[in-house]
Structures are given as structure tokens and as C-alpha cells.
Image: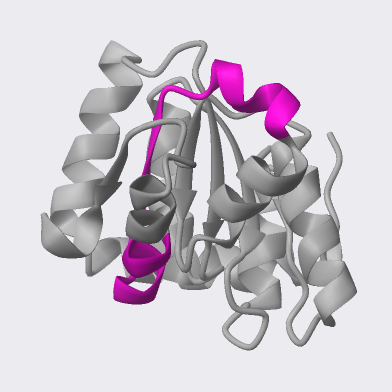
Amino acid sequence: MEYHIKDLRLAEQGRLRIEWAEWEMPVLRQIRERMAQERPLEGWRIGACLHVTTETANLMRTLKAGGAQVALCASNPLSTQDDVAAALVEEGIPVFALRGEDRETYYRHIHAVLDTRPQITMDDGADLVSTLHSQRREILEGVVGGTEETTTGVIRLRAMAADGALMYPIIAVNDA
């Protein structure tokens, strides 16, 4: 499994923080338990460009429990929690994120997630979707849908849609 994080030795600290956050997210914990039994995402590949935090970690763990193959990169290098990234890697989730990473590394990480050929995208700011459409068009055919968290990202995606450039449906989570 490929990944690019600061230090795998931070995993134990990250695991403890993820578990603590899980107790503050009882509904997601129940969803994860059900998804682990039913495995509704078996065989699906999900590429996520989100804040690498304990909350996102619990979402990624839930998707994986449901059978998905998940890959995660940071949507904002300044919010990346390096210990959380390490813990997710130890759980078998490819993570490409470094707190404070430079612009070149940021986009290299987006490409690493796109290298997994996601069928579903999860984005925060539309950089993953924008890069997919502008630089990785060869994998667009396999993408069936996605989500976008931010108002800024939704504005970017609506502009793409108005230009006829958005090639798959995306749910605006902020509007849901």
C-alpha cells in the first residue's frame, strides 16, 4: 500500500485520538457497525480530499468497514493531523498528507489519490474534482458521482457545470 505521511510512529497517539472522537460521534459509530455487517460499498473505490482530522478518520473507517477501498489526501495542509494520518495508514487506509506540505506536494498527493481510480469522489474545495477534470480525464469514465463540502467548492463546480465541463453528478453537502 502506498502512502505519504510524516511518521508512522505517530500512529498510536492518532489511534487514541480517533477512538476518543468516535465516542463523540455515536450515530456514525452505529452506522459503521451496520456497514461492517452489510458491506454495501464492497468493491467501490472512494477518493477523498478532506481535512485529515479525527472526525474525517472516523468517516474513512466507516466507509472502509462498509467494504470501500478508500484513499485520502489533505484538502488543507494546515489542518492535517499527522498522528491521525499515521493511524489511518496502520489501519490499511492509504493517506497522502503532511501538515504544512507545500503546493507541489499538495498536488502530488491529489494525483496519488486519483491514481487509485476512484469511482466516487469526496471533496472539500473542489481541488480533487478540478484536477480530475483538467489533468486526469482518462479516468473520468469510471467516476459515477461525488460530494463537495464547501460553499467555495460548490461555486467552482456550478461554474464547471454551467460551462458543460462537469462530467458527473456531485452532491453539494452544504446544501443537503
- Quarter that holds the N terminus: top right
Foreground residue, 103 or 160? 160
Horizontal arrangement in the rendering, residue 71 relative to residue 63 (left or right): right
Where is residue 124? Give x, y as percent: 45, 64
Where is residue 66? Give x, y as percent: 38, 25
Where is residue 144? Give x, y as percent: 42, 22
Horizontal arrangement in the rendering, residue 106 relative to residue 81 (left or right): right
User: Does the image show residue 19?
Assistant: no
Horizontal arrangement in the rendering, residue 56 relative to residue 155 (left or right): right
Where is residue 17? Give x, y as percent: 49, 73
First to last magenta residue range: 137-156
| Res. 85 image quadrant | bottom right
Q: Is residue 91 positioned above or below 145 on the image? A: below
Q: Residue at x 44, y 52 (%)?
A: 160
Considering every residue shown, the one lying at the far front of the view is 163
Q: Is residue 16 positioned above or below 166 on the image? A: below
Q: Is residue 101 positioned above or below 123 on the image? A: below
Main secondary structure of the magenta stretch: helix
